[in-house]
Image (tube, helix red, strand yellow):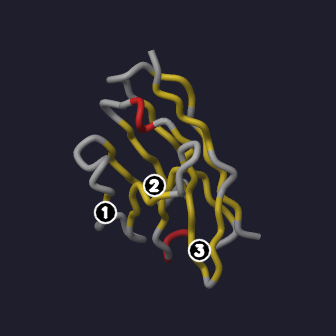
Amino acid sequence: QVQLVESGGGLVQPGGFLTLSCAASGFTFTSYYIHWHRQAPGKERELVARISPTGALSTYADSVRGRFVISRDNEKNTVYLQMNALKPEDTAVYYCLVVITYEYWGQGTQVTVSS
């Protein structure tokens, strides 16, 4: 079955960096966009970034453009989110998503940006 497993979250100081990973299985990884979303306490889940099947195309939310980089390794069935210059407002649970007729979400990984 389709499975997405996020990892790499943690506590980081403002201005710091983290790299999240999303390991995928159970579907033809090279055929689908993969998305990163996040949900902060009391807020709706929002799109952070997404990447095309080949990795040639990527889009970002305005709030992270220029600070975050999404990439994928199609040999490892893994998508990454490199997060730089982190701000307290980046604190959220980060989820990866693939849409294959239905939406499949990972369990999420917590990112906390605080001094």
The residue type indicated by label 2 comes to Asp
| Quarter containing the C terminus | top left
Between 108 and 2, which is closer to the camera in this rendering?
108
Going from N to C along the chain, the mark reached first, 2 or 3, is 3
Mark 1 residue crowding within 10 angstroms, few (<14) / some (14–19) / many (20+):
some
Q: Relative to 61, does residue 10 appear above or below in the rendering?
A: above
Tell how many labels: 3
Q: Earlier in the sequence, mark 1 or mark 2?
A: 1
C-alpha separation, residue under disc 3 versus residue under disc 1: 21 Å
How packed mark 2 is, by other alpha carbons closer than 10 Å (few <14, some 14-19, many 20 or more), is some
- Would you name the residue on which mark 2 appears? 73
Q: Secondary structure at mark 1?
A: strand
- Which residue is at 47% across, 58% downward? 46
Residue position marked by numbered label 3 in the rendering: 28
Secondary element type, mark 3: loop
Coordinates of residue 73 in the picture (x, y in percent): 45, 55
SS category of the residue bearing label 2:
strand
Q: Give the residue displayed 28% in from the left and 41% down from the top.
A: 67
Residue at the spot x=49%, y=65% of the render?
A: 34
Name the amino acid, label 1: Thr
- Amino acid type, mark 3: Thr
> In the depicted view, which residue is nearer to us: 91 or 44?
44
Whether 64 is drawn above or below 60: the answer is: above
Task: Place residue 4 in its image quadrant.
Answer: bottom right
How crowded is the residue under tag 3: few (<14 C-alpha within 10 Å), some, or many (20+)?
Answer: few
Of pointers 3 and 1, the one earlier in the residue sequence: 3
Q: Quadrant of residue 109?
A: top right
Numbered label attached to residue 59: 1
**Separation of disc 2 and disc 3 at Cα?**
13 Å
